[in-house]
Image (cartoon, rainbow, N blue to C red):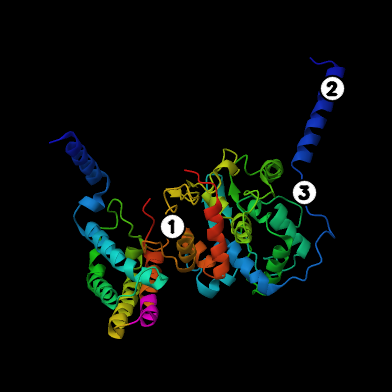
Amino acid sequence: MSYLKSRSFLAAVALAFTSPLFAGEGPAHERHELMEGVGDAAKPVGEMLKGEREFDAGVVMNSFETFDEASATLGDLFPPGSEDAEGTEAAPAIWEDRAGFEAALATWADAVDAAIAANPQTLEETKPVAGEVFKACKACHDDYRIEDE
Amino acid sequence: MFGSRTARSLAALLAVAVGFAWWVTSPQPVEGGSLPDHEPDPVAGERIFWAGGCASCHASPRNGKRAKGDDKLLLGGGEELETGYGVFRVPNISTHADDGIGEWTLLEFVNAMHRGVSPDGRHYYPSFPYTSYTRMPVEDVMDLKAFLDTLPPVPGRVAAHSLGFPWSIRRGIGAWKRRYLDTDPVMPSAPSTLVGRGRLLVEGAGHCGECHTPRDRLGGLRRERWLAGAPNPEGKGRVPNITPGGKEISQWSAADIAYYLESGFTPEFDTVGGSMVAVQENMARLSDEDRQAIAAYLKALPALD
């Protein structure tokens, strides 16, 4: 093992200890990964809305489908006992106000369903339906996510 | 032990010291009759209201949660800010005659905003960010009062702050103000009209520096580290460096900054978090030009790392 490689290896080990969400297992890790995927899918759509990227209906629909899959499982990844996972950004409000959290998730899922049903073929058709999806992302984060500090 | 001459000299010295301390700590209100000839405009004042973030502290929490939507216009106060100095309780600034500020004159309001002095001549603690508001044009302050006057009265007087010694001695703020209450702009000259507009919003009403700039041991802002990031006043973590030299947003374009303030989405399409959520919701109520001006100002700052 070269010096460089062993150093990367040590860095990876260090990361594994300091960032359990990146290297660990369990619901806190799974939901973190799921949300990372949702963020990756949101970015190209957002850039199209901002006018920074050429519109592509296929990319938009792929992203909507990623959201759809995520919205079907996300709610199950916050079981009792996972609120204290180290490094989690999940707010205690998720467990204190489960009904409110489920409602916020449902708002998101409904917005995604509507976006898929609309099957937008132009930027103008995408804006309103994607706008509702993004609004739902933000509303849920505002109430049920804390800063990772 | 002391001769009577020594005692008299000591007494005289003490009197001078007390007199000096009294003078140093005395409130410095704006003189009556010094307001400009300006017809206060409540529509213009609404812009200042959102830029100034009044609702973020003064809107009454509902069921322990931050006010949202139209509840942001119910300014009954009551939020508690827990800090290293003690607990600050945010007062009622609704139009309620007894519990709020409904009976205040325009001059009293300008004195609060620009000088941190209450109608009864006492100092306000700088948890009320008059250190920034002092840089607002007086016409904007007058417009803001006109807008506040259109909002509903909310009953309920808020309890006093609970601060530890020596912070509990309100008079001491007078000396603090002589050092830190500074009407001069932080950016000495604005390179364009747009940056100038952003400077008024960021350094004045927006009071961005109150969280994004670190403080010295006496709680005054360190101007040489203007907007270069600071410990979070509400607990753990850090408030980001928003100069072009920081790690956090230096890669963002001016358009990215303006879009973030409008939508709450970062260039990575993550959403705004923490205390900035309420700030961003206020900024979303401004015009595109105002958000572009804020972005242009931030891009024109010296890069501090």
The mark lying in front, picked from 1 and 3, is: 1
Chain under numbered label 2: B
Residue under the point 84% across and 27% down: B12
Secondary element at image label 1? loop
Q: Which mark is residue B252?
A: 1
First reached walking from the N terminus: tag 3 or tag 2: 2
Q: Is residue B116 left or right of residue B290?
A: right
Residue under the point 59% across and 44% down: B221
The amino acid type found where label 3 is placed reads Gln
Which secondary structure dominates the residues rendered in magenta? helix
Q: Position of residue B205 (x, y in %)?
A: 62, 59
First reached walking from the N terminus: tag 1 or tag 3: 3
Which range is magenta?
A122-131
Q: Which residue is mark 3?
A: B28
Q: Is residue A130 magenta?
A: yes
Any part of residue A25 in sight? yes
Q: Is residue A141 left or right of residue B102?
A: left
Q: Are marks 1 and 2 on the same chain?
A: yes
The amino acid type found where label 2 is placed reads Ser
Name above or below for residue A32 compared with residue B263. above
Q: Which residue is mark 2?
A: B9
The mark lying in front, picked from 1 and 2, is: 1
Q: CA distance from mark 1 to mark 3?
A: 42 Å
